[in-house]
Image (cartoon, rainbow, N blue to C red):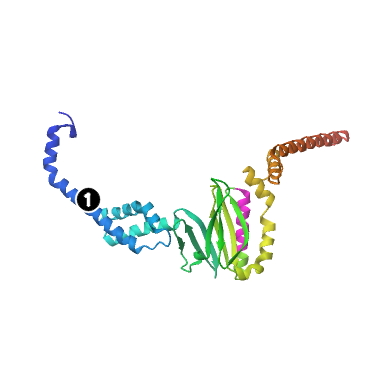
Amino acid sequence: MTKGWKSESVRHSLARKGVKTASKKVVKSNGIEKKTEEIFRKLKEEFNVSRNVDKFWGNYEDDFKKKIKEALEEGKSPEEAKKAGYEEAEVYRSEGNPIATISVFEGGEEHKIVISEYDIYDESGRDYGYDFEPKWHSTDAWRGYYEMEAKGWTQVHEDTSLAYSEDSRELKNFDEKLVEELKARGIPVARVVSSTSNLFSSSVDYFVRDKNQADVKDIVDKLKKKHRSEERFTSTALTGADPPYSKKDKQFVLGAKMVKAGIKPKQAVAFVKLLDEVGTDAEIHKETKRKEKGVE
């Protein structure tokens, strides 16, 4: 006799014995599906998404229904199942496709706002998020970055975080000191971290209330001088390396700067090579002089 479902006699026997049980399973499954749809409709009515509602639900409703169905199958009540779906939707709404994360430091507290493709999630309840509006700027067909426009706030410093670099560590030091000093003076400050098309970099910008712009200029300038280096940032951004930079890295950065200044690439390469040759000759001359003087 063949095994399992391949046996015609076993198949008929199980089918006859299991008709009633199988029917119950189908009814139960259909009941859960129906209940899931009912709960989801209520969830959708109650859940308020401020922008692009149809697109939001259309993209993710299967995930929310799955969460509701799982809760029902675990024996939870319809209200508990709806709560499970609601919590899942809240996560998607606030964290899905984040465009910018804003931290507002005011009144001794940090308030976090997440701006996504579909909504603004403001945990503070103060509607800070509606002061900020991201605008996408394309640098070419594939790349670009978000620039934040703000109502009632003035940008006092713009920067970029280069992931896993010494420069990003110095940016963190700048950030901590700026927040600390402005907090001590009772001046609200907003840090806005926006996404770019480069996975390894993010825009990091700082805003203060319009009325406080003049009050923070000297503080920002002092901290920039200590923690932000244009030379280090540019070199790390172009080479991906931390200081001290190799000779080749320095030559590459010099050539890139020349091209950016309007010099043709071939001319920039030729000039860098010439400088290298002159530098080599100078080093040889210097070493010869040292040996002539008997200096080791």
Q: Is residue 96 left or right of residue 263?
A: left
Q: Position of residue 228 (x, y in %)?
A: 66, 55
Within 10 Å of disc 1 (Cα), the crowding (few <14, some 14-19, many 20+) is few
Q: Which residues are magenta?
A: 165-179
**Looking at the image, which residue is at 70% across and 57% down?**
225
Assign the C terminus to one quadrant of the image: top right
Q: Amino acid at mark 1?
A: Ser
Task: Out of 72 and 204, give the one closest to the viewer.
Answer: 204
Q: Is residue 176 magenta?
A: yes
**Looking at the image, which residue is at 53% across and 63% down?**
132
Task: Out of 239 and 130, give the one closest to the viewer.
Answer: 130
- Residue sitting at the far right: 293
Q: Is residue 231 left or right of residue 70?
A: right
Q: Position of residue 261 (x, y in %)?
A: 71, 46
- In this rendering, the answer to whether 2 lies above or below 177 is above
Decide if residue 244 is in sight here.
Answer: no
Decide if residue 220 is in sight here.
Answer: yes
Q: Position of residue 43 (x, y in %)?
A: 32, 61
Assign the N terminus to one quadrant of the image: top left
Q: Quadrant of residue 218?
A: bottom right
State the residue position of label 1: 29
Q: Quadrant of residue 77?
A: bottom left
Q: Is residue 255 magenta?
A: no
Task: Out of 168 and 56, give the one closest to the viewer.
Answer: 56
The secondary structure that dominates the magenta segment is helix
- Residue sitting at the far top: 1
Q: Check disc 1 and report its element: helix, strand or loop.
A: helix
